[in-house]
Amino acid sequence: MALYNDKVMDHFMNPHNVGEIENADGKGVYGSPVCGDMMQVTISVDDKDVITDAKFKTFGCGSAIASSSMATDMIKGMTVEEALEVSNQKIVDELGGLPAIKIHCSVLAEHAIKNAIYDYAQKNGKEYAGLEGYDPNEERDHHDDCESCEG
Ligand code: FES
């Protein structure tokens, strides 16, 4: 059986939203504690709190590229609050699944987006329920996020 489905392969081979938005309203970087890979997400947000654009740069594996391509597609057009609800599981579901050992790559996308929104919130003095208690610098144990790990 192929490790990756066609949708994952397509987002890996032809990723959407690659790059960096100039003068972005929010910018987030997240490094995976599991593998050391990094992802940067930049977002534009309009005055109604709608994310009008999102771009990513990933120094990571194919699953991280596919996850960030899908995740940035998903949040475009969402409000900030809606985007904060985009969990790594939702990204994996949209991709039609990832191999268990690659689930952490989608966590990278979730956190990079959250960090970009955190940056936007800080710059604009905004508060969102989805960011309550969120610390972008906290080194999270990936096992908190990864149901497929046994450790
Ligand atoms: Fe590092 Fe996938 S192995 S993000």
Image (cartoon, rainbow, N blue to C red):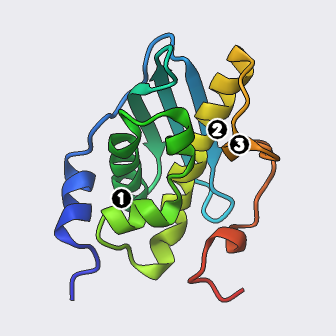
Q: Judging from the image, what secondary structure is the residue with disc 1 in? A: helix
Q: Residue at x 72, y 86 (%)?
A: 151
Location of mark 2 (residue): 115
Give me the disc on residue 129: 3
Q: Residue at x 71, y 23 (%)?
A: 126
Q: Inspect the image, locate mark 1, and give the three-letter code of the amino acid beneath it.
A: Gly
Residue 125 sits above or below residue 115 on the image: above
Residue 98 is situated, as x and y percent measured from the top left of the image, at 38, 73
The picture quadrant where one finds residue 61 is: bottom left
Q: Is the residue at mark 1 in contact range of ligand 1, meaning its CB lies under 8 Å from it?
A: yes
Location of mark 1 (residue): 62
Q: Nearer the viewer, residue 93 or 104?
A: 93
Residue 42 sits above or below residue 16 on the image: above
Q: Residue at x 73, y 30 (%)?
A: 127
Q: Is residue 16 left or right of residue 62?
A: left
Residue 26 appears in view: yes
Q: Judging from the image, what secondary structure is the residue with disc 3 in? A: helix
Q: CA distance from mark 3 to mark 1?
A: 32 Å
Residue 136 is situated, as x and y percent measured from the top left of the image, at 75, 42
Q: Nearer the viewer, residue 105 or 72?
A: 72
Residue 105 appears in view: no
| Mark 1, other Cα within 10 Å: few <14 / some 14–19 / many ≥20 | some
